[in-house]
Amino acid sequence: MEVIALVSATHALPPAWLVIPFVVLLLMIATGPLFYHHIWERYYPVFAFLLGFPVVLYYLFILNDAEHPVHTLFEYISFLSLIGSLFIASSGILIKIKGETHPLANVLLLGIGAVLANIIGTTGASILLIRPYMRLNKHRISTYHIVFFIFVVSNVGGSLTPIGDPPLFLGFLKGVPFFWTVEHMFFPWLFGVGLILLLFYFLDNRRWKAWLKEQGKDSSKFSFGLEFKGLLNVLWLAIIIGSVFLDPAILPWLPAVNYHGERFSIIREIIMISVAIMAYLLANKEILKENNFNFEPIKEVGFLFLGIFATMMPALQLVSAFAHSPEGLKLISESTLYWLTGSLSSVLDNAPTYLTFLAAAMGKYGLDINLKGDVLQFVHNYPDYLIAISIAAVFFGAMTYIGNAPNFMVRNIAEQSGVDMPSFGGYIAKYSMVYLLPILALTFLVFVIAL
Protein backbone atom coordinates (compact mmCIF):
# COMPACT_ATOMS: atom_id res chain seq x y z
CA MET A 1 0.00 0.00 0.00
CA GLU A 2 1.38 3.37 -0.92
CA VAL A 3 -0.30 6.38 0.57
CA ILE A 4 0.39 9.83 -0.79
CA ALA A 5 1.68 12.62 1.45
CA LEU A 6 -0.75 14.64 3.49
CA VAL A 7 -2.07 17.80 1.85
CA SER A 8 -1.15 20.99 3.64
CA ALA A 9 -4.67 22.30 3.66
CA THR A 10 -5.59 25.93 4.25
CA HIS A 11 -9.19 25.04 5.00
CA ALA A 12 -10.81 25.26 8.42
CA LEU A 13 -10.32 22.32 10.71
CA PRO A 14 -13.27 19.94 11.04
CA PRO A 15 -15.14 19.92 14.36
CA ALA A 16 -14.12 17.29 16.87
CA TRP A 17 -17.54 15.63 16.73
CA LEU A 18 -16.92 14.69 13.09
CA VAL A 19 -14.65 11.93 14.42
CA ILE A 20 -17.77 10.13 15.73
CA PRO A 21 -18.47 8.20 12.48
CA PHE A 22 -14.93 6.82 12.60
CA VAL A 23 -15.38 5.71 16.22
CA VAL A 24 -18.76 4.17 15.38
CA LEU A 25 -17.26 2.26 12.44
CA LEU A 26 -14.50 0.90 14.66
CA LEU A 27 -17.07 -0.17 17.24
CA MET A 28 -19.13 -1.90 14.57
CA ILE A 29 -16.06 -3.71 13.24
CA ALA A 30 -15.40 -4.81 16.82
CA THR A 31 -18.94 -5.86 17.75
CA GLY A 32 -20.56 -6.83 14.44
CA PRO A 33 -19.01 -10.28 13.96
CA LEU A 34 -19.65 -11.05 17.64
CA PHE A 35 -23.17 -9.81 18.43
CA TYR A 36 -24.99 -9.46 15.10
CA HIS A 37 -22.95 -11.69 12.85
CA HIS A 38 -25.52 -12.37 10.10
CA ILE A 39 -26.54 -8.72 9.77
CA TRP A 40 -22.91 -7.60 9.74
CA GLU A 41 -21.80 -10.16 7.15
CA ARG A 42 -24.63 -9.14 4.84
CA TYR A 43 -24.62 -5.37 5.28
CA TYR A 44 -21.08 -4.29 6.27
CA PRO A 45 -20.59 -2.54 2.89
CA VAL A 46 -23.75 -0.53 3.57
CA PHE A 47 -22.61 0.41 7.08
CA ALA A 48 -19.20 1.52 5.76
CA PHE A 49 -20.87 3.66 3.08
CA LEU A 50 -23.49 5.21 5.39
CA LEU A 51 -20.83 6.28 7.87
CA GLY A 52 -18.26 7.48 5.33
CA PHE A 53 -20.48 9.31 2.84
CA PRO A 54 -21.81 12.00 5.26
CA VAL A 55 -18.23 12.84 6.29
CA VAL A 56 -17.31 13.39 2.65
CA LEU A 57 -20.42 15.55 2.15
CA TYR A 58 -19.53 17.63 5.21
CA TYR A 59 -16.08 18.31 3.78
CA LEU A 60 -17.46 19.21 0.36
CA PHE A 61 -20.45 21.38 1.28
CA ILE A 62 -19.88 22.62 4.85
CA LEU A 63 -16.10 23.03 4.98
CA ASN A 64 -15.91 23.78 1.22
CA ASP A 65 -12.90 21.49 1.21
CA ALA A 66 -12.61 19.20 -1.80
CA GLU A 67 -8.85 18.74 -1.40
CA HIS A 68 -9.00 16.25 1.46
CA PRO A 69 -11.69 14.02 -0.09
CA VAL A 70 -9.96 14.02 -3.49
CA HIS A 71 -6.61 13.34 -1.86
CA THR A 72 -8.13 10.51 0.19
CA LEU A 73 -9.76 9.06 -2.92
CA PHE A 74 -6.39 8.81 -4.67
CA GLU A 75 -4.89 7.31 -1.52
CA TYR A 76 -7.62 4.70 -1.50
CA ILE A 77 -7.20 3.86 -5.19
CA SER A 78 -3.45 3.40 -4.69
CA PHE A 79 -4.05 1.32 -1.58
CA LEU A 80 -6.62 -1.00 -3.14
CA SER A 81 -4.68 -1.36 -6.41
CA LEU A 82 -1.61 -2.63 -4.57
CA ILE A 83 -3.45 -4.76 -2.02
CA GLY A 84 -5.74 -6.30 -4.64
CA SER A 85 -3.02 -7.03 -7.20
CA LEU A 86 -0.75 -8.64 -4.59
CA PHE A 87 -3.66 -10.71 -3.28
CA ILE A 88 -4.57 -12.07 -6.72
CA ALA A 89 -0.99 -12.65 -7.90
CA SER A 90 0.04 -14.36 -4.66
CA SER A 91 -3.03 -16.60 -4.73
CA GLY A 92 -1.81 -18.12 -7.99
CA ILE A 93 1.26 -19.53 -6.27
CA LEU A 94 1.02 -22.85 -4.49
CA ILE A 95 3.49 -23.67 -1.75
CA LYS A 96 3.29 -27.07 -0.12
CA ILE A 97 5.35 -27.79 2.94
CA LYS A 98 6.69 -31.29 3.31
CA GLY A 99 6.85 -32.46 6.88
CA GLU A 100 4.73 -32.86 9.97
CA THR A 101 3.46 -30.07 12.14
CA HIS A 102 6.23 -29.08 14.53
CA PRO A 103 7.03 -25.92 16.52
CA LEU A 104 10.43 -25.56 14.83
CA ALA A 105 8.83 -25.86 11.38
CA ASN A 106 6.37 -23.12 12.32
CA VAL A 107 9.14 -20.85 13.61
CA LEU A 108 11.16 -21.45 10.45
CA LEU A 109 8.21 -20.62 8.21
CA LEU A 110 7.40 -17.45 10.15
CA GLY A 111 11.06 -16.45 9.98
CA ILE A 112 11.04 -16.95 6.21
CA GLY A 113 7.92 -14.78 6.09
CA ALA A 114 9.65 -12.04 8.10
CA VAL A 115 12.45 -11.91 5.52
CA LEU A 116 10.12 -12.23 2.52
CA ALA A 117 7.96 -9.35 3.80
CA ASN A 118 10.84 -6.99 3.02
CA ILE A 119 11.08 -8.21 -0.57
CA ILE A 120 7.43 -8.44 -1.65
CA GLY A 121 5.81 -6.44 1.15
CA THR A 122 3.81 -7.61 4.14
CA THR A 123 0.71 -8.11 1.99
CA GLY A 124 2.49 -10.26 -0.59
CA ALA A 125 4.24 -12.37 2.04
CA SER A 126 1.04 -12.79 4.07
CA ILE A 127 -1.08 -13.99 1.17
CA LEU A 128 1.71 -16.18 -0.16
CA LEU A 129 2.38 -18.01 3.11
CA ILE A 130 -0.85 -18.06 5.14
CA ARG A 131 -2.36 -21.01 3.28
CA PRO A 132 0.73 -23.29 3.40
CA TYR A 133 1.15 -22.30 7.04
CA MET A 134 -2.41 -23.41 7.79
CA ARG A 135 -1.96 -26.61 5.76
CA LEU A 136 1.15 -27.47 7.77
CA ASN A 137 -0.85 -27.16 10.98
CA LYS A 138 -4.17 -28.46 9.67
CA HIS A 139 -4.48 -31.13 12.38
CA ARG A 140 -3.97 -28.68 15.25
CA ILE A 141 -4.52 -25.19 13.83
CA SER A 142 -5.48 -22.75 16.54
CA THR A 143 -6.20 -19.06 16.93
CA TYR A 144 -2.77 -18.22 18.27
CA HIS A 145 -1.13 -19.65 15.15
CA ILE A 146 -2.87 -17.03 13.01
CA VAL A 147 -2.38 -14.19 15.48
CA PHE A 148 1.38 -14.73 15.66
CA PHE A 149 1.47 -14.98 11.86
CA ILE A 150 -0.14 -11.52 11.78
CA PHE A 151 2.38 -10.24 14.33
CA VAL A 152 5.42 -11.45 12.40
CA VAL A 153 4.66 -11.73 8.68
CA SER A 154 1.92 -9.10 8.30
CA ASN A 155 3.62 -6.42 10.37
CA VAL A 156 6.89 -6.51 12.32
CA GLY A 157 8.72 -8.53 9.67
CA GLY A 158 8.28 -5.75 7.11
CA SER A 159 10.33 -3.15 8.98
CA LEU A 160 13.65 -3.81 7.27
CA THR A 161 13.21 -2.12 3.87
CA PRO A 162 11.02 0.61 2.38
CA ILE A 163 9.28 -2.08 0.31
CA GLY A 164 8.21 -3.89 3.48
CA ASP A 165 5.63 -1.46 4.85
CA PRO A 166 3.97 1.72 3.51
CA PRO A 167 5.27 4.19 6.15
CA LEU A 168 8.87 3.31 5.34
CA PHE A 169 8.19 3.65 1.63
CA LEU A 170 6.70 7.10 2.20
CA GLY A 171 9.84 8.06 4.08
CA PHE A 172 11.86 6.93 1.06
CA LEU A 173 9.67 9.05 -1.25
CA LYS A 174 10.25 12.06 0.99
CA GLY A 175 14.01 11.66 0.84
CA VAL A 176 15.07 9.09 3.45
CA PRO A 177 17.86 7.08 1.74
CA PHE A 178 16.72 3.60 0.69
CA PHE A 179 19.39 1.77 2.67
CA TRP A 180 18.93 3.91 5.79
CA THR A 181 16.13 1.55 6.80
CA VAL A 182 18.29 -1.56 6.59
CA GLU A 183 21.17 0.14 8.40
CA HIS A 184 19.15 1.56 11.28
CA MET A 185 16.26 -0.88 11.54
CA PHE A 186 18.15 -4.18 11.33
CA PHE A 187 18.64 -4.63 15.08
CA PRO A 188 15.12 -3.46 16.04
CA TRP A 189 13.79 -5.86 13.35
CA LEU A 190 15.94 -8.72 14.64
CA PHE A 191 14.99 -7.95 18.25
CA GLY A 192 11.25 -7.66 17.59
CA VAL A 193 10.96 -10.64 15.27
CA GLY A 194 13.26 -12.72 17.48
CA LEU A 195 11.30 -12.06 20.68
CA ILE A 196 7.96 -12.78 19.04
CA LEU A 197 9.27 -16.02 17.54
CA LEU A 198 10.80 -17.07 20.86
CA LEU A 199 7.54 -16.43 22.68
CA PHE A 200 5.64 -18.25 19.95
CA TYR A 201 7.97 -21.26 20.14
CA PHE A 202 7.42 -21.76 23.88
CA LEU A 203 3.66 -21.37 23.47
CA ASP A 204 3.47 -23.63 20.41
CA ASN A 205 5.82 -26.24 21.87
CA ARG A 206 3.63 -26.60 24.96
CA ARG A 207 0.46 -26.90 22.87
CA TRP A 208 2.20 -29.32 20.47
CA LYS A 209 3.24 -31.64 23.28
CA ALA A 210 -0.31 -31.64 24.63
CA TRP A 211 -1.58 -32.46 21.12
CA LEU A 212 0.90 -35.33 20.77
CA LYS A 213 -0.34 -36.73 24.07
CA GLU A 214 -3.94 -36.53 22.85
CA GLN A 215 -2.92 -38.38 19.68
CA GLY A 216 -1.14 -41.08 21.66
CA LYS A 217 2.25 -40.14 20.25
CA ASP A 218 5.48 -39.76 22.18
CA SER A 219 7.26 -37.48 19.74
CA SER A 220 7.42 -36.23 16.17
CA LYS A 221 10.60 -35.60 14.22
CA PHE A 222 11.30 -32.17 12.83
CA SER A 223 11.41 -32.06 9.03
CA PHE A 224 10.90 -29.24 6.57
CA GLY A 225 10.72 -29.04 2.78
CA LEU A 226 8.97 -26.90 0.17
CA GLU A 227 7.16 -27.69 -3.06
CA PHE A 228 6.54 -24.67 -5.30
CA LYS A 229 4.12 -24.18 -8.21
CA GLY A 230 3.03 -21.05 -10.10
CA LEU A 231 6.28 -19.59 -11.45
CA LEU A 232 4.44 -17.21 -13.80
CA ASN A 233 2.89 -15.50 -10.81
CA VAL A 234 6.35 -14.73 -9.45
CA LEU A 235 6.78 -12.59 -12.55
CA TRP A 236 3.47 -10.86 -11.82
CA LEU A 237 4.63 -10.15 -8.25
CA ALA A 238 7.91 -8.73 -9.55
CA ILE A 239 6.05 -6.39 -11.90
CA ILE A 240 3.77 -5.21 -9.09
CA ILE A 241 6.66 -4.55 -6.70
CA GLY A 242 8.63 -2.81 -9.43
CA SER A 243 5.68 -0.60 -10.34
CA VAL A 244 5.55 0.70 -6.75
CA PHE A 245 8.51 2.91 -7.66
CA LEU A 246 6.67 4.45 -10.62
CA ASP A 247 5.76 7.46 -8.55
CA PRO A 248 5.84 11.11 -9.69
CA ALA A 249 7.80 11.92 -6.53
CA ILE A 250 10.63 9.69 -7.79
CA LEU A 251 10.19 10.12 -11.55
CA PRO A 252 8.82 13.65 -12.20
CA TRP A 253 8.42 12.94 -15.94
CA LEU A 254 5.73 10.32 -15.33
CA PRO A 255 2.17 11.22 -16.41
CA ALA A 256 0.12 12.17 -13.36
CA VAL A 257 -3.15 13.78 -12.35
CA ASN A 258 -2.47 17.33 -11.14
CA TYR A 259 -4.76 18.70 -8.45
CA HIS A 260 -4.06 21.76 -6.31
CA GLY A 261 -0.32 21.36 -6.63
CA GLU A 262 -0.35 17.62 -5.92
CA ARG A 263 0.61 15.07 -8.59
CA PHE A 264 -1.20 11.78 -8.21
CA SER A 265 0.09 8.60 -9.83
CA ILE A 266 -1.98 6.89 -12.53
CA ILE A 267 0.54 4.74 -14.45
CA ARG A 268 1.35 2.63 -11.40
CA GLU A 269 -2.29 1.91 -10.65
CA ILE A 270 -3.05 1.06 -14.30
CA ILE A 271 -0.15 -1.42 -14.30
CA MET A 272 -1.25 -3.01 -11.01
CA ILE A 273 -4.88 -3.40 -12.07
CA SER A 274 -3.82 -4.80 -15.45
CA VAL A 275 -1.46 -7.28 -13.79
CA ALA A 276 -4.22 -8.35 -11.39
CA ILE A 277 -6.55 -9.09 -14.29
CA MET A 278 -3.87 -10.98 -16.23
CA ALA A 279 -2.76 -12.89 -13.13
CA TYR A 280 -6.30 -14.09 -12.53
CA LEU A 281 -7.10 -14.95 -16.15
CA LEU A 282 -3.83 -16.81 -16.74
CA ALA A 283 -3.59 -18.46 -13.32
CA ASN A 284 -3.53 -22.22 -13.02
CA LYS A 285 -7.12 -22.99 -11.97
CA GLU A 286 -5.99 -26.05 -10.03
CA ILE A 287 -3.68 -23.87 -7.94
CA LEU A 288 -6.50 -21.41 -7.25
CA LYS A 289 -8.72 -24.31 -6.26
CA GLU A 290 -6.11 -25.79 -3.92
CA ASN A 291 -5.63 -22.35 -2.36
CA ASN A 292 -9.42 -22.06 -1.88
CA PHE A 293 -9.24 -18.77 -3.76
CA ASN A 294 -12.19 -16.38 -3.77
CA PHE A 295 -12.57 -12.61 -3.74
CA GLU A 296 -14.18 -12.33 -0.28
CA PRO A 297 -10.99 -11.23 1.57
CA ILE A 298 -10.27 -8.37 -0.84
CA LYS A 299 -13.97 -7.49 -0.94
CA GLU A 300 -14.05 -7.11 2.85
CA VAL A 301 -10.88 -5.04 2.89
CA GLY A 302 -12.11 -2.91 -0.01
CA PHE A 303 -15.46 -1.95 1.52
CA LEU A 304 -14.35 -1.56 5.13
CA PHE A 305 -11.27 0.47 4.28
CA LEU A 306 -13.35 2.68 2.00
CA GLY A 307 -15.31 3.61 5.10
CA ILE A 308 -12.18 3.85 7.23
CA PHE A 309 -10.38 6.12 4.75
CA ALA A 310 -13.41 8.44 4.56
CA THR A 311 -14.23 8.60 8.26
CA MET A 312 -10.64 8.97 9.47
CA MET A 313 -10.05 12.20 7.50
CA PRO A 314 -11.07 14.48 10.38
CA ALA A 315 -9.14 12.38 12.90
CA LEU A 316 -5.94 12.61 10.87
CA GLN A 317 -6.41 16.31 10.23
CA LEU A 318 -7.00 17.10 13.91
CA VAL A 319 -4.01 14.99 14.99
CA SER A 320 -1.82 16.72 12.40
CA ALA A 321 -2.97 20.17 13.54
CA PHE A 322 -2.18 19.37 17.18
CA ALA A 323 1.20 17.84 16.33
CA HIS A 324 2.22 21.05 14.54
CA SER A 325 0.82 23.39 17.21
CA PRO A 326 3.11 25.02 19.82
CA GLU A 327 1.65 22.70 22.45
CA GLY A 328 2.27 19.66 20.29
CA LEU A 329 5.81 20.65 19.38
CA LYS A 330 6.67 20.95 23.08
CA LEU A 331 5.82 17.25 23.45
CA ILE A 332 8.22 16.17 20.72
CA SER A 333 10.78 13.68 22.04
CA GLU A 334 11.88 10.18 21.14
CA SER A 335 9.56 8.74 23.79
CA THR A 336 6.44 10.68 22.87
CA LEU A 337 7.05 10.10 19.16
CA TYR A 338 7.27 6.35 19.76
CA TRP A 339 4.08 6.02 21.80
CA LEU A 340 1.99 8.57 19.92
CA THR A 341 2.98 7.25 16.49
CA GLY A 342 2.44 3.69 17.69
CA SER A 343 -0.89 4.25 19.40
CA LEU A 344 -2.39 6.09 16.45
CA SER A 345 -0.89 3.64 13.95
CA SER A 346 -2.93 0.94 15.70
CA VAL A 347 -6.24 2.55 14.78
CA LEU A 348 -5.44 5.02 11.99
CA ASP A 349 -3.59 4.43 8.76
CA ASN A 350 0.04 4.07 9.84
CA ALA A 351 1.41 5.75 6.69
CA PRO A 352 -0.08 9.25 7.17
CA THR A 353 0.49 8.87 10.92
CA TYR A 354 4.19 8.32 10.17
CA LEU A 355 4.26 11.42 7.96
CA THR A 356 2.38 13.51 10.52
CA PHE A 357 4.87 12.92 13.30
CA LEU A 358 7.90 13.01 11.00
CA ALA A 359 6.75 16.45 9.80
CA ALA A 360 6.17 17.55 13.40
CA ALA A 361 9.60 16.33 14.53
CA MET A 362 11.25 18.13 11.63
CA GLY A 363 9.19 21.25 12.35
CA LYS A 364 10.68 21.39 15.83
CA TYR A 365 14.00 22.25 14.17
CA GLY A 366 12.59 24.47 11.44
CA LEU A 367 12.86 21.83 8.73
CA ASP A 368 10.32 21.16 5.97
CA ILE A 369 9.28 17.57 5.16
CA ASN A 370 8.60 18.59 1.55
CA LEU A 371 12.25 19.58 0.96
CA LYS A 372 14.50 16.57 0.38
CA GLY A 373 17.53 18.54 1.54
CA ASP A 374 15.81 19.17 4.87
CA VAL A 375 14.85 15.50 5.15
CA LEU A 376 18.46 14.43 4.60
CA GLN A 377 19.63 16.96 7.18
CA PHE A 378 17.10 15.64 9.69
CA VAL A 379 18.04 12.01 8.99
CA HIS A 380 21.72 12.84 9.50
CA ASN A 381 21.35 15.03 12.60
CA TYR A 382 18.38 13.43 14.40
CA PRO A 383 18.29 9.73 13.47
CA ASP A 384 16.93 8.74 16.90
CA TYR A 385 13.66 10.54 16.17
CA LEU A 386 13.23 8.75 12.86
CA ILE A 387 14.09 5.38 14.41
CA ALA A 388 11.39 5.88 17.07
CA ILE A 389 8.79 6.89 14.46
CA SER A 390 9.71 4.06 12.06
CA ILE A 391 9.65 1.29 14.66
CA ALA A 392 6.35 2.47 16.12
CA ALA A 393 4.56 2.93 12.79
CA VAL A 394 5.39 -0.61 11.64
CA PHE A 395 5.38 -2.62 14.88
CA PHE A 396 2.15 -1.18 16.28
CA GLY A 397 0.31 -2.08 13.09
CA ALA A 398 -0.08 -5.53 14.63
CA MET A 399 -2.02 -4.25 17.64
CA THR A 400 -5.42 -4.35 15.90
CA TYR A 401 -7.03 -5.88 12.83
CA ILE A 402 -7.10 -2.47 11.12
CA GLY A 403 -3.54 -1.45 11.99
CA ASN A 404 -2.38 -2.88 8.65
CA ALA A 405 -4.46 -4.13 5.73
CA PRO A 406 -2.95 -7.66 5.57
CA ASN A 407 -4.28 -8.29 9.09
CA PHE A 408 -7.87 -8.21 7.87
CA MET A 409 -7.13 -10.36 4.85
CA VAL A 410 -5.32 -13.02 6.89
CA ARG A 411 -8.19 -13.06 9.37
CA ASN A 412 -10.73 -13.53 6.58
CA ILE A 413 -8.76 -16.35 4.92
CA ALA A 414 -8.34 -18.10 8.28
CA GLU A 415 -12.05 -17.81 9.09
CA GLN A 416 -12.98 -19.25 5.68
CA SER A 417 -10.73 -22.21 6.51
CA GLY A 418 -12.62 -22.81 9.77
CA VAL A 419 -10.23 -21.17 12.24
CA ASP A 420 -12.04 -19.58 15.17
CA MET A 421 -10.66 -16.05 15.03
CA PRO A 422 -11.21 -13.58 17.88
CA SER A 423 -13.34 -10.46 17.55
CA PHE A 424 -11.73 -7.04 17.18
CA GLY A 425 -11.74 -6.52 20.95
CA GLY A 426 -10.84 -10.13 21.67
CA TYR A 427 -7.77 -9.86 19.45
CA ILE A 428 -6.58 -6.84 21.43
CA ALA A 429 -7.46 -8.09 24.92
CA LYS A 430 -6.38 -11.73 24.57
CA TYR A 431 -3.40 -11.44 22.26
CA SER A 432 -1.88 -8.07 21.36
CA MET A 433 -2.09 -6.66 24.90
CA VAL A 434 -0.84 -9.91 26.45
CA TYR A 435 1.87 -10.98 24.02
CA LEU A 436 2.76 -8.04 21.77
CA LEU A 437 2.58 -4.99 24.04
CA PRO A 438 5.31 -6.23 26.44
CA ILE A 439 7.61 -6.76 23.43
CA LEU A 440 6.80 -3.25 22.19
CA ALA A 441 7.66 -1.91 25.65
CA LEU A 442 10.98 -3.81 25.68
CA THR A 443 11.73 -2.53 22.18
CA PHE A 444 11.08 0.99 23.48
CA LEU A 445 13.49 0.52 26.38
CA VAL A 446 16.26 -0.96 24.22
CA PHE A 447 16.05 1.13 21.06
CA VAL A 448 14.45 4.41 22.12
CA ILE A 449 15.25 5.11 25.76
CA ALA A 450 18.76 3.63 25.57
CA LEU A 451 19.70 5.54 22.39
Image: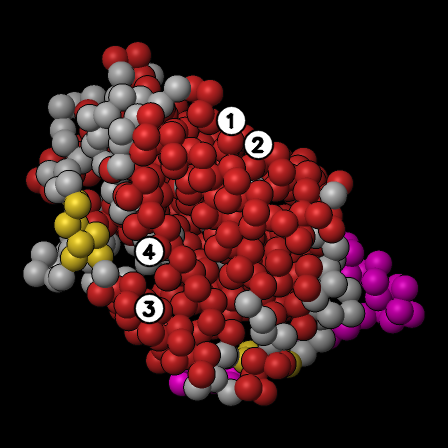
Q: Are marks 2 and 1 in contact (CB under 8 Å)?
A: yes
Residue 267 picture location, percent across and down: 22, 65
| N-terminal-most mark, 3 or 1 | 1
| N-terminal-most mark, 4 or 2 | 2
Is residue 207 magenta-colored?
A: yes
Magenta stretch: give its range: 206-234
Which residue, given by chain and number where applicable, does mark 3 sit on?
272
- What's the residue type where badge 1 is placed? Ile
Q: Are marks 4 and 1 in contact (CB under 8 Å)?
A: no
Q: Quadrant of residue 413?
A: bottom right
Q: Are marks 4 and 2 in contact (CB under 8 Å)?
A: no
Number of other residues with Cα within 10 Å of mark 2, as a class: few under 14, some 14 to 19, many 20 or more: some
Number of other residues with Cα within 10 Å of mark 3, as a class: few under 14, some 14 to 19, many 20 or more: many
Which residue, given by chain and number where applicable, does mark 2 sit on?
24
State the separation of the CA atoms marked 2 and 1. 6 Å
Which residue, given by chain and number where applicable, does mark 1 sit on?
20
Q: Which mark is residue 78?
A: 4
| N-terminal-most mark, 3 or 4 | 4
